[in-house]
Amino acid sequence: MNDFIGSDPQGSWRLKITNSGSAGTLQNWTLRLKSNVPFNCKPIGCAQAVPAAVGDTLTVARSGGADVRLNWGSVGSADYNVWRSADAQFATARFVGASGGATTLLDAGAQALPGMHFYLVRSVNSCRWESP
């Protein structure tokens, strides 16, 4: 992937996967892109830019004996999506829910989950595009 550093991200891209080893069947694959450089794009068919990131405003607290309450700072988005993962890189993230524009969400029953979990909140515009 280092060959792509500094390349223009706009335009058409093609991903080619080859199997140079033993025969097999591709069951699943994921491509994740991460950028330390802020970007601003206007998705086709959407007059809105990608919404602003929520940043480091998330707080997580127990709520009652079984639930987890999440709160975060507003960035003025139409909605917020909440994700939970057992790993800090969110390779196996699970969608918890959408807040409907509120800056709080209750993750029902989350205290009963085994192990440690991480949360990520992404702002969403009216075209359903998530922030980075």
Image (cartoon, rainbow, N blue to C red):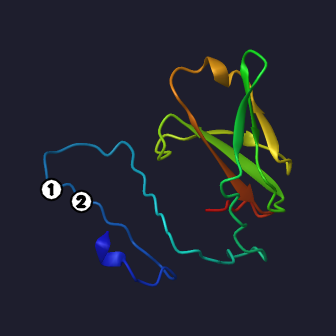
Residue 3 vertical placement versus 72 (above, below): below
Tag 1's secondary structure?
A: loop
Q: Is residue 22 above or below residue 50?
A: above
In the visual, does 75 lie left or right of 58?
Answer: right
List x then y, in percent, for residue 99.
Answer: 81, 44
Q: Which residue is mark 1?
A: 20
Number of numbered tags placed on the structure image:
2
Residue 66, percent across and down? Answer: 72, 17
- State the residue at coordinates (29%, 60%): 17
**Residue beneath the point at 70% across and 36% down:** 60
Q: Residue at x 47, y 38 (%)?
A: 87
Q: Please tell me how crowded label 2 is: few (under 14), some (14-19), or many (20+) other residues with Cα within 10 Å.
A: few
- CA distance separating discs 2 and 1: 6 Å
- What amino acid type should be assigned to the residue bearing mark 1? Ser
Q: Secondary structure at mark 2?
A: loop
Is residue 19 toward the left or the right of residue 71 in the image? Answer: left
Disc number at residue 79? none
Q: Residue at the spot x=48%, y=64% of the render?
A: 34
Local crowd size for mark 1, using a 10 Å CA cut-off: few (<14), some (14–19), many (≥20): few
In the image, 40 versus 24, the foreground residue is: 40
The quarter in which the C terminus is drawn is bottom right
Q: Amino acid at mark 2?
A: Thr
Residue 117: where, in percent of width, then height? 55, 32
Check contact, mark 2 vs mark 1: CB within 8 A.
yes
In the picture provided, is 126 more to the left or to the right than 66? Answer: right
Report which residue position mark 2 lands on: 18
What is the quadrant of residue 69 in the picture? top right
In x, y percent, where is residue 10?
52, 82
Residue 32 figure quarter: bottom left
Q: Pick the residue in front: 39 or 43.
A: 39
